[in-house]
Image: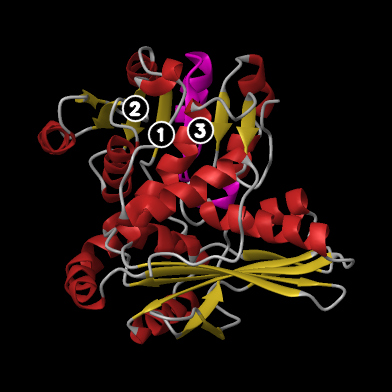
Amino acid sequence: MMARSVVHSKSCCSAFAFRASAVETRPGRVRIPDKARDARVLVLGGTGRVGGSTALALSKLSPDLRIVVGGRNREKGDSMVATLGKNSAFAQVNIDDMVSLERALADVDLVVHTAGPFQQAQNCNVLEAAIATKTAYVDVCDDTRYALLAKSFNDKAAAANISAITTGGIYPGVSNVMAAELVRAAKDESKGEPEKLRFYYYTAGTGGAGPTILATSFLLLGEEVVAYRKGEKIKLKPYSGGLNIDFGKGIGKRDVFLLNLPEVKSAHEILGVPTVSARFGTAPFFWNWGMSAMTNLLPPEYLQDRSKVQELVRQFDPIVRVIDGIAGERVSMRVDLECSDGRHAVAIFTHRRLSVSVGYSTAAFVLAILEGSSKPGVWFPEEVRTLP
């Protein structure tokens, strides 16, 4: 089964997130208003696994969209354009150069930022350029500091009359929506108050995403984990607190460990749940041992240095690619909610390919903005900010 969930969304972003994820097994068109049907969408990092998957998903869900693949490598860009077909083009873009960015954004309606890793980034160049050019925005950020920095541009985005979604991928992203729907349903159907919210993630290998996901994982090992216990913020050691969690049919029980992920803070503050944490695990099992060993043996300063982490990635990448070929790229997300009256609700999403499901998840948030569902400003996925 492609995806399973106990929740059903009422908000526009949420509805698109689950609907777009579900249609991957039966690709079909998503209806959006005539005025946005042939919108131009720039996918930064469009030659990579996440960006390329997003561009492909958009082309299937809404074939009239004009997709611009943004990246540095023209050869890879031309190859992606050939795959996407006639409604696509390539733009050479350097996201570290504001002039290059603003030039690329000048003639598009929405930009999707998938050019990670987001850890240790010093600014939000793409979002700032989007605001300057009045271009709608979605990113797949998976870093707490970056997400909060993006959120700080809320007033500027609102003043520019643009809608922006940060952390709008699969996890964080769809997982935030799952949490929001569990909380909404609990408040509608239960007399108790939501007390504990736990995110559990599993991906086989690197999920087929290769060096970028590997770099993200290593960089996260250098960050203290922020969690919340009864309303109090606590800091914990990364890749500690292991639990054995049942992800259901197709995945089974897997070990997961604490990581510093942005949905913990946003869900705590926006959904008002006093106890929140997030854990992640991978396979084969010895990768978890390796991640734990790196946390214990390497100083945080080393793991916070992007140049040193990139060198680690260069060394490990050939091994990872071989093991990915064996492990596959199954992905599963489980979100658990406990309430004061004893209610315990669970939402589970499972897919055989992370590289495909992340594309449809990201495309869902893009289409939600293009259909005109979101108010101007910068929003997390679990925030319901729809137009009347």
Q: Quadrant of the N terminus?
A: bottom left
Q: Secondary structure at mark 1?
A: strand
Name the residue: 86% across, 65% down.
193
Q: Quadrant of residue 74?
A: top left
Report if residue 227 is visible in the image.
Answer: yes
Pair 2/3: label in front = 2
Of 290 and 297, which appears nearest the observer?
290
Residue type at mark 1? Val
Residue matched to label 1: 112
Give me the C-alpha separation between circle 1 and circle 3: 13 Å
Of 246 and 282, which appears nearest the observer?
246
In this picture, which residue range is highlighted in magenta?
121-145
Relative to 161, say whether 254 is above or below.
Answer: below
Mark 2: few/some/many CA within 10 Å (<14, 14-19, 20+) = many
Relative to 65, say whether 296 is above or below.
Answer: below
**Would residue 130 be counted in the magenta stretch?**
yes
Name the residue: 55% across, 25% down.
372
Q: Secondary structure at mark 2?
A: strand
Residue matched to label 2: 42
Mark 1: few/some/many CA within 10 Å (<14, 14-19, 20+) = many
Q: Are marks 1 and 2 in contact (CB under 8 Å)?
A: yes
Residue type at mark 3? Cys
Residue matched to label 3: 124
Q: Position of residue 38 (x, y in %)?
A: 34, 20
